[in-house]
Image (spheres, coloured by chain):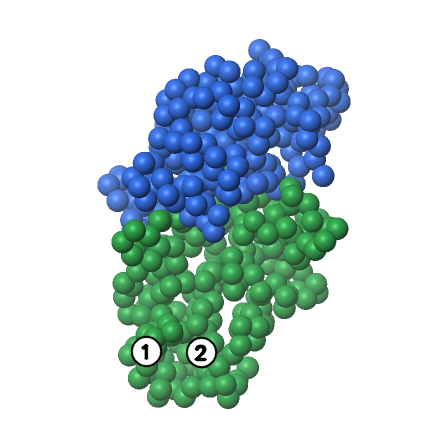
Amino acid sequence: MSNSTPLSRDQLAQRVAADVTVGSFVNLGIGMPTKVSDYLDADRRVTLHTENGMLGMGPEAHDGEIDDDLINAGKIPVTELPGASYFHHADSFAMMRGGHLDLCVMGAYQVSVTGDLANWHTGKPGAIPAVGGAMDLAIGAREVYVMMTLFTRDGRPKLVAELTYPITGLACVNRVYTDVATFHLVDGRAHVVDIHGIDFAELLARTGLDLVDARANSVPTNKE
Amino acid sequence: MLEVMPTARAAVEDIGNGATVMIGGFGTAGQPVELIDALIEQGATELTVVNNNAGNGDVGLAELIRLGRVRRIICSFPRQSDSWHFDARYLAGEIELEVVPQGNLAERIRAGGAGIGAFFTPTGYGTLLAEGKETRIIDGRGQVLEYPIKADIALIKAARADRAGNLVYRKTARNFGPIMATAARTTIVQVADLVDIGGIDPEAVVTPGIYVNRIVVTAEATA
């Protein structure tokens, strides 16, 4: 996929969905990552996990479908698909911590080129810390994809050489999907596999990173 | 020995000041609302509460916090759009907070119920939440030593119990119920439906009756 403009939120969700392996077990984080499910067709046979205790989660529930006992990790009413299962919290987290979950997609404040993730705490004085399942997902899922805008509102890159926000997990992120570029993080460097509405020279200049232009190549991955 | 209690209030009558109380539920799903309301009425204070969150809106755990009855809370995700009572107490320095990654919270409760002394886990390694904790490299990975959480009381909600105390839950309302039931000295369960022995298929039991001390049937029916 290549665009002359940055990807919209929906296009970004579609871009991530295109890379989700057929038949995999996937956890989609709260917020933007939830949108990825809109682009996972049934023939992909992807099973969605929600950490509050369910596999086989279906789309958001509406009107008559709403059941207070059936919610996702964002506490939004959802539906169950045929083949769904329920389990308690320790089993749910054992599923990710034990390396059984193929993929999780999360948002982030910052990611380092070595795959360190910051997405739980702004570190601002007076901010109330709240971590939820982020640290467990970061270290537990076999692959971690981050989905975010590449730049903050004031133009600073969120893909960085070293984190300045509090760490969620070390060396855990495999790929970063952003509105302007997709990065595979391999051996301590960020490989750019596609760009949208920005040219490579500008990407280098605005991130200040030693990026690898991998647009024409098949990219190495850390995938097992 | 299992007791079927006449009211939620009677079920929580002996909870003492300073008790550690696990409260089931994730958001409102599985929240034992009637038992929490009974605890509010009963008056125990200086409580340590273990829950995934720190109260939502103005009811249940949020109300217990508003009343200043919670000295300390152990949870994974206190800050939410509707956690105003917790936020106010916390920012005023009136409640102690231990933030625990959600999987560590669940596993520490499970360990508490299973007699595990402590365990190493990669979750949280290298983060603020591992500061001051013992770490070790195991299998080439940094891991953090985490200790179990046990409680005096667990307040949980199940969909149905039989008179042997066996429980089944409903959908994602199961969440922390089965592990909290194992980790407390006294487990108190509210159910919408109490059936005779034989009324739950043994193959379908999620929490065996050995973990359950008191049952109260609440008027509320599940959807």
B20 in relation to B140, above or below: above
Residue nearest the viewer, comparing B162 with A220: B162
What residue did someone put label 1 on?
A207
Looking at the rendered structure, the secondary structure element under dot 1 is helix
What residue did someone put label 2 on?
A181
Residue nearest the viewer, comparing B185 with B9: B9
A178 in relation to B16, above or below: below
Q: Is A65 positioned to the left or the right of B6 in the image?
A: right
Q: Can residue B77 be seen in this view?
A: no
Q: Residue B64: x, y in percent?
A: 45, 32
B17 in relation to A146, above or below: above
**What residue is at 61 percent from the left and 15 percent from the top?**
B5
**Mark number, residue B58:** none
**What residue is at 56 percent from the left and 19 percent from the top?**
B9
Q: Quadrant of residue B209?
A: top right
Q: Residue A118: x, y in percent?
A: 36, 59
Q: Residue B223: x, y in percent?
A: 72, 39
**What residue is at 45 percent from the left and 26 percent from the top?**
B21
Give chain A's shade.
Answer: green
Quadrant of the drawing holding the N terminus of chain A: bottom right
In the rendered structure, which amino acid carries the disc numbered 2?
Answer: Ala
Q: Which of marks 2 and 1 is nearer the N terminus?
A: 2
Give chain B's shade.
Answer: blue
The chain containing the residue under callout 1 comes to A
In the rendered structure, which amino acid carries the disc numbered 1?
Answer: Thr
Residue nearest the viewer, comparing A44 with A119: A119
Give neighbour class at mark 1: few <14, some 14-19, many 20+ (Cα, 10 Å): some
**What residue is at 45 percent from the left and 21 percent from the top?**
B43
